[in-house]
Image: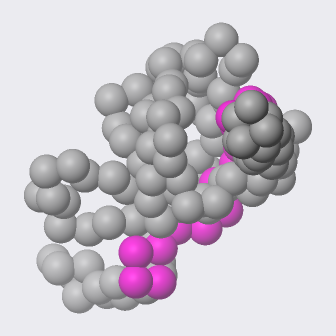
Amino acid sequence: MKTLTIIIITFLASCMNLKDNSNDLIGKWECYHKELEDGTTESVDAFSGEEFEYSCDGITIELNSDFTGIDDTGIKFKYQKKDSILTLGNRSYVIEKLTKAQLVIRNYDQKGINISNFRTKFRKID
């Protein structure tokens, strides 16, 4: 009985230390930085040969508590967070960092067929 009590107390203590930051997703997010997974922020246009910097193009998304969202162009979507995978509409991302003020996501491709894998950084603007 003493061993069972110790196990239960240990289990409850470990559950209290787990941080569920799903609620941190709720709000309006503005993209401020985009880079390749390796940190590269610039590339060369294959047709013109000119250098360009990867851009967020003013992306803003708003995530609501009812698991719906809307982007800056007015497109509505559903989202889901499962473990470290964030699905926005039909696209999946790995959550690299999630705090009350910052969200960092990286493209997630289960099939491994993407040529480029981007990391996108957002800040909360609520």
- Residue found at the very far top of the displayed protein: 66
Q: What stretch is highlighted in magenta?
A: 21-39
- The one of 90 and 46 positioned closer to us in this rendering: 90
The quadrant holding residue 102 is: bottom right
Q: Answer with left or right where residue 113 lies relative to residue 58.
A: left
- The residue positioned 12% from the left and 58% from the top of the image is 113
Considering only vertical position in the picture, is 113 above or below 49? above
Is residue 114 visible in the rendered image? The answer is yes
Considering only vertical position in the picture, is 43 above or below 107? below
- The one of 105 and 70 positioned closer to us in this rendering: 105
The quadrant holding residue 85 is: top left
* Chosen colour scheme: one colour
- The residue positioned 40% from the left and 83% from the top of the image is 38
The quadrant holding residue 6 is: top right
Is 93 contained in the magenta span?
no
- The residue positioned 15% from the left and 77% from the top of the image is 47
Considering only vertical position in the picture, is 76 above or below 80? above
Q: How many marks?
A: 0
Q: Position of residue 39 (x, y in %)?
A: 47, 84
- Residue found at the very far front of the displayed protein: 1
Is residue 42 visible in the rendered image? The answer is no
- Residue found at the very far right of the displayed protein: 126
Q: Where is residue 43 in the image (x, y as percent from the top left)?
A: 34, 84
Q: Name the quarter where the N terminus is drawn.
A: top right
Q: Position of residue 100 (x, y in %)?
A: 83, 48
- The residue positioned 87% from the left and 37% from the top of the image is 126
